Image (tube, grey):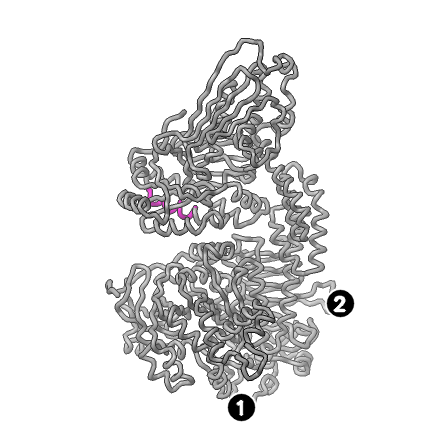
């Protein structure tokens, strides 16, 4: 390895929003198209008990349903054996072994009973029975699993410092970063963001099997896809950190030499330190040149031979784990197991539990440190840290209202900074600044202070209690309140504590409850220590084991909560007596008796009810702006009642359009019906309704282009004059004199830099669009054209460049809908949209129309639309119609809807107008287009010609297939799609400025982001061939993308400089593995 000098002193942290958005984009891509973007073969969570494992299985299934985990990924939650703590190291081995057994079971199930019997027994005679030995089974499991890519998440434990997250599991606490990007989707959890980051890490393993270990209370924000992981080793992810923080965490001592790059370093690990003092850091030379040290993030990657060693150990670890259980010992991952890969720690490790075995089995391999300088280490170790991450410098990322029902500001007092997630808030409620309310129903009369946390609380309304029971409850500032269902108990216990209480700090060490020292709490309330604790042995008295929480009627529990928090008459003998006589429970006991099944059911029903309420409001009062398809997924979790609710929505649909006919597009109303029918599994009716959706899109497009256009289309084929036919001779020729006319239209193709999709109906009919594109010639010629000439014989003769020909004598047969296999439907559609069949020219003569397109089929260069523009322009020119580019562009937009191919306006704009242009569209009747030519300087023109390669990939693509998916998602009001197209339109403006400033590098960045967004819209817009082409070209380019809708066709490769462009062109032309063609091109600057 090369020493490139000491590490730099200052490095900025990654942009959190940018890192998370890129990671989420990668996650969605890997889930939707795992064959193209590899995902994890298995995701395994460790759990503290079988009950907690069952909860985690529920979360894993939900994550699959929500599109967070690919359906092909195996998921497993593995509890510590016998519910006894064995340490994170032993839990790692146990989890790998459990996964291996799970894979073995799946293999046997796939074989079937008879094959399993044959595999187990070679003969019916016991003497010759050849069952596999345990060693053979273990070896088989190792061979199978060492090729897999596994994500292991340590999520067991009791979450003492975040006790309100204990029931759900800390890894599943709500973290609404980027929640506003998908307002109808589920509330993002810490687990979801961890999945997003880890999906990028999968890329670093390539095709080599391995294990990626993360912890459930840390979100490491960095670009994991760029990790460099040494082969056949383990690698721990580190980040430079200040010494004060390091003193409470693990520290890695890494070699001063290795791979030292601008953004990262890869160095051999020389030592491991746990919560070291400054003196220890100095002694072990752990302090970097900039005064910081390397923090152990808890992320470990194990690859190749090191992974095989670990799997082999795990598959034979059950005796070792039994030994730990018998001796009540634990084996830590970050102290013991990891130490086996660090020779300096072998002497320390060997006398520890199973230390000799670890050194013997794993000690041959080394461990490296991958230091990510820009990594942001977000730790969720305490309640206050959770709120800090929601209200700190990155609070702009936080969705503060998500899938919730909240009252008007005139009947409630809810702070703007309060975070309300999956909750229903009644009028008369007050919620203070920076508080978090999650998965709760809060009735009137409840006051929640600032910086407080309320989770899973369901406060009954006034109508559910007698007048004498009506109370007001106030949760003070900096407090936590939650409810938990218990096994064998019909009531949910109400639990509470102070935000900064540490349940592990004992009474003797000034531990607190509700922010006050225990001694003061006991004195103020008149409670004896013996009332609160009945401990044996050496166990210290603390909040964790204090029997403080009574199990009584709901409002008795609320009254006692007010008293225990010191908000009522503290020397209240009746409350003291009620508290003493009640059955009480501690946090420790609560952790062991949670009814996880009831909690999951209650949460699912609560969220389904909220989704149903939001959907009902959308149907009753709104303009269908919500994603009902997504909301129905939640509603249907209520099973029978969910189906009933969705069917009720369906019955309301016929009245939707009638009620809002002036402003609600029919296409959107019909799509709602399609979504509801599919939610109810009525696929046949949904397909029938889908035809009405596309017909409505075509009608709406036509209406936006020309008044009364729909009626014009219906009647045009019947308006041919009967007398014209009567005046013809029997052979179809006229007796009149003939005047010949001929028109030739030649047009360039277009390449689009950014903004595509914002030009496509129905988006462009409802929202503004912006596109940046350029007209170009290929191989010094205009590749698209049409010749139209008048002929003596009536009717229309059509030829194309592939040898197809048709003569249409009876023009009344030209009518929609067209056969999708009809090679002449483009010209036929042009005849309709131009209204030429109403023109008297066809009474006295006919037309001969010839078309050509000298570009490969499926090019993505806008060929179809530009050819349509050439035909439309020629027809208008020969009939002295309005052949202005704007009119032609709008007519082609209608033409593509008639053809059934869809499409927007940017292709015809790209071919009709010369040069580079920035085009905006503005919804209305008629649709308005504004084309702004960019005055390209000689320097810009020269640099584009030198640096941009126009490459045909050889991959055939059909825009229609991609377009249908995108349009349906838009009509559903898929928020991720809407935000992506908005961003594409914004990037068009950024790209325009970049071009005008001759900043080609910035244009490259715009192209890269645009390409990522196109894949967000549809992952099938690329394929493995294109991915390999772009990966090969990446080191030469500052930007690249496929043109048009993607899926194949032409690619734009924007090189870093002229020399890189020449070298890349040479490599592509010489590389037979790609077989691409690089075209000579030039900007088309002259009008036709």
Q: Residue 847 magenta-drawn?
A: no
The residue beneath circle 2 is 466
* Mark before the other along the chain sequence, 2 or 1: 2
Q: Residue 1007 magenta-drawn?
A: yes
Where disc 1 sits, the SS reads: loop
Q: In which quarter of the image is residue 419?
A: bottom right
Q: In this view, does 192 lie above or below 1083?
A: below
Q: What stretch is highlighted in magenta?
A: 999-1010
Quadrant placement of the C terminus: top left
Q: Point out residue 117 in the picture as x, y percentages from the top left corner.
A: 58, 74
The residue depicted at 35 percent of the width and 32 percent of the height is 935
Q: Can residue 639 be seen in this view?
A: yes
Viewer-side residue, 1066 vs 757: 1066
Viewer-side residue, 647 vs 604: 647
Q: Mark 2, mark 1: which one is toward the viewer?
A: 1
Where disc 2 sits, the SS reads: loop
Q: Is residue 184 above or below residue 484?
A: above
Gap between marks 2 and 1 measured at Cα: 46 Å
Q: Would you call the spot at circle 2 few (<14 residues within 10 Å), some (14-19), or many (20 or more)? A: few
Q: In which quarter of the image is residue 534?
A: bottom right
Q: Viewed as shown, does residue 764 lie left or right of 693?
A: left
Q: Of the numbered discs in the image, which one, if any, rests on residue 537?
A: 1
Q: Point out residue 278 in the picture as x, y percentages from the top left corner.
A: 32, 76
Q: Point out residue 100 in the picture as x, y percentages from the top left corner.
A: 50, 72
């Amino acid at each position: 390895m090369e020493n490139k000098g000491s590490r730099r002193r200052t490095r900025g942290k990654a942009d959190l929003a940018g890192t998370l958005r890129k990671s989420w984009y990668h996650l969605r891509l890997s889930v939707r198209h795992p064959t193209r973007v590899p995902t994890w073969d298995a995701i395994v969570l460790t759990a503290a008990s079988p009950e907690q494992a069952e909860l985690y299985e529920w979360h894993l299934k939900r994550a699959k349903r929500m599109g967070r985990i690919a359906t092909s990924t195996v998921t497993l939650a593995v509890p510590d054996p016998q519910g006894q703590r064995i340490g994170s190291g032993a839990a790692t081995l146990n989890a790998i072994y459990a996964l291996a057994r799970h894979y073995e079971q799946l293999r046997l199930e796939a074989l079937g009973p008879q094959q399993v019997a044959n595999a187990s027994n070679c003969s019916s005679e016991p003497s010759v029975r050849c069952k596999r030995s345990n060693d053979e089974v273990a070896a088989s499991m190792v061979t199978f699993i060492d090729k897999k890519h596994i994500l292991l998440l340590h999520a067991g434990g009791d979450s003492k410092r975040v006790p309100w997250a204990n029931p759900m599991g800390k890894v599943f606490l709500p973290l609404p970063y980027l929640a506003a990007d998908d307002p109808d989707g589920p509330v993002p959890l810490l687990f979801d963001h961890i999945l997003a980051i880890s999906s990028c890490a999968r890329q670093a393993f390539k095709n080599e099997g391995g294990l990626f270990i993360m912890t459930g209370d840390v979100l490491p924000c960095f670009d994991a896809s760029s990790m460099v992981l040494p082969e056949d080793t383990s690698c721990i992810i580190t980040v430079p950190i200040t010494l004060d923080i390091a003193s409470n965490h693990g520290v890695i001592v890494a070699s001063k030499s290795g791979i030292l790059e601008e953004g990262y370093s890869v160095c051999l690990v020389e030592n491991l330190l746990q919560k070291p003092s400054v003196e220890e850091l100095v002694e072990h030379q752990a302090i970097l040149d900039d005064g910081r040290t390397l923090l152990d993030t808890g992320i470990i990657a194990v690859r190749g031979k090191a992974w095989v060693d670990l799997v082999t150990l795990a598959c034979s670890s059950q005796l070792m784990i039994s030994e730990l259980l018998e001796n009540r010992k634990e084996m830590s991952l970050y102290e013991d197991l990891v130490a086996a890969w660090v020779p300096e720690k072998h002497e320390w490790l060997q006398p520890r539990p199973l230390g000799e075995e670890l050194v013997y089995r794993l000690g041959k391999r080394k461990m490296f440190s991958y230091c990510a300088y820009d990594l942001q280490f977000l730790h969720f170790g305490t309640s206050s840290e959770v709120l800090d991450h929601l209200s700190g410098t990155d609070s702009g990322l936080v969705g503060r209202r998500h899938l919730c029902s909240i009252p008007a500001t005139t009947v409630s007092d809810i702070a703007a900074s309060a975070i309300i997630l999956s909750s229903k808030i009644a009028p008369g409620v007050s919620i203070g600044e920076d508080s978090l309310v999650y998965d709760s129903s809060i009735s009137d009369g409840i006051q929640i202070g600032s910086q407080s946390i309320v989770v899973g609380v369901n406060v009954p309304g006034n109508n559910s209690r007698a007048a004498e029971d009506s109370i007001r409850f106030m949760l003070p500032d900096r407090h936590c309140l939650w409810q938990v269902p218990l096994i064998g108990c019909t009531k949910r216990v109400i639990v509470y504590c102070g935000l900064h209480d540490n349940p592990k700090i004992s009474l003797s060490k000034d531990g607190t409850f509700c922010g006050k020292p225990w001694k003061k709490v006991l004195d103020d309330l008149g409670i004896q220590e013996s009332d609160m604790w009945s401990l044996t042995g050496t166990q210290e008295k603390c909040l964790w084991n204090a029997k403080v929480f009574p199990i009584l009627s709901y409002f008795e529990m609320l009254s006692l909560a007010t008293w225990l928090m010191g908000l009522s008459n503290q020397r209240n003998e009746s409350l003291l007596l009620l508290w003493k006589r009640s059955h009480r429970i501690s946090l420790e006991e609560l952790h062991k008796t949670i009814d996880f099944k009831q909690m999951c059911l209650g949460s699912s029903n609560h969220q389904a009810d909220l989704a149903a309420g939001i959907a009902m409001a959308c149907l009753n009062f709104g303009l269908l702006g919500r994603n009902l398809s997504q909301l129905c997924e939640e509603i249907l979790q209520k099973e029978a009642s969910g189906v009933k609710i969705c069917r009720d929505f369906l019955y309301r649909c016929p009245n939707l359009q009638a009620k809002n006919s002036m402003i609600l597009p029919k296409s959107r109303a019909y799509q709602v019906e399609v979504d509801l029918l599919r939610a109810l599994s009525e696929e046949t009716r949904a397909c029938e309704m889908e035809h009405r959706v596309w017909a409505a899109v075509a009608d709406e497009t036509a209406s936006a282009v020309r008044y009364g256009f729909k009626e014009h289309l219906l009647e045009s084929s019947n308006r041919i004059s009967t007398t014209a036919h009567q005046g013809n001779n029997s052979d179809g020729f006229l007796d009149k004199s003939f005047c010949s006319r001929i028109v030739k239209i030649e047009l360039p193709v277009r390449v689009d830099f950014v903004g595509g999709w914002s030009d496509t109906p129905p988006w462009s009919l409802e929202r503004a669009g912006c596109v940046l594109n350029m007209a170009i010639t290929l191989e010094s010629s205009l590749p698209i054209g049409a010749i139209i000439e008048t002929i003596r014989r009536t009717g229309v003769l059509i030829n194309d460049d592939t040898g197809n020909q048709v003569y249409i004598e009876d023009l009344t047969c030209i009518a929609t809908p067209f056969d999708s296999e009809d090679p002449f439907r483009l010209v036929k559609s042009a005849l309709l949209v131009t209204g030429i069949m109403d023109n008297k020219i066809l009474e006295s003569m006919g037309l001969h129309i010839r078309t050509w397109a000298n570009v490969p089929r499926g090019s993505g260069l806008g060929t179809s639309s530009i050819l349509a523009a050439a035909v439309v322009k020629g027809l208008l020119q020969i009939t002295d119609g309005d052949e202005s580019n704007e009119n032609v562009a709008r007519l082609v937009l209608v033409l593509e809807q008639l053809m059934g191919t869809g499409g927007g306006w940017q292709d015809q704009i790209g071919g009709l107008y010369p040069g580079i242009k920035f085009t905006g569209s503005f919804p209305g009747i008629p649709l308005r287009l504004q084309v702004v030519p960019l005055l390209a300087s000689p320097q810009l023109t020269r640099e584009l010609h030198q640096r941009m390669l126009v490459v045909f990939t050889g991959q055939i693509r059909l825009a229609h297939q991609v377009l249908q998916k995108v349009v349906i998602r838009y009509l559903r009001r898929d928020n991720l799609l809407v935000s992506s197209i908005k961003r594409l339109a914004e990037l068009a403006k950024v790209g325009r400025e970049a071009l005008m400033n001759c900043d080609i590098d910035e244009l490259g960045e715009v192209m890269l982001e645009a390409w990522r967004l196109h894949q967000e819209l549809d992952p099938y817009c690329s394929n493995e061939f294109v991915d390999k082409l772009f990966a090969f070209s990446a080191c030469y380019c500052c930007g690249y993308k496929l043109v048009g809708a993607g899926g194949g066709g032409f690619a734009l490769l924007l090189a870093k400089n002229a020399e890189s462009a020449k070298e890349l062109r040479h490599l592509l032309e010489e590389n037979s593995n790609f077989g691409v063609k690089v075209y000579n091109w030039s900007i088309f600057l002259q009008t036709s």
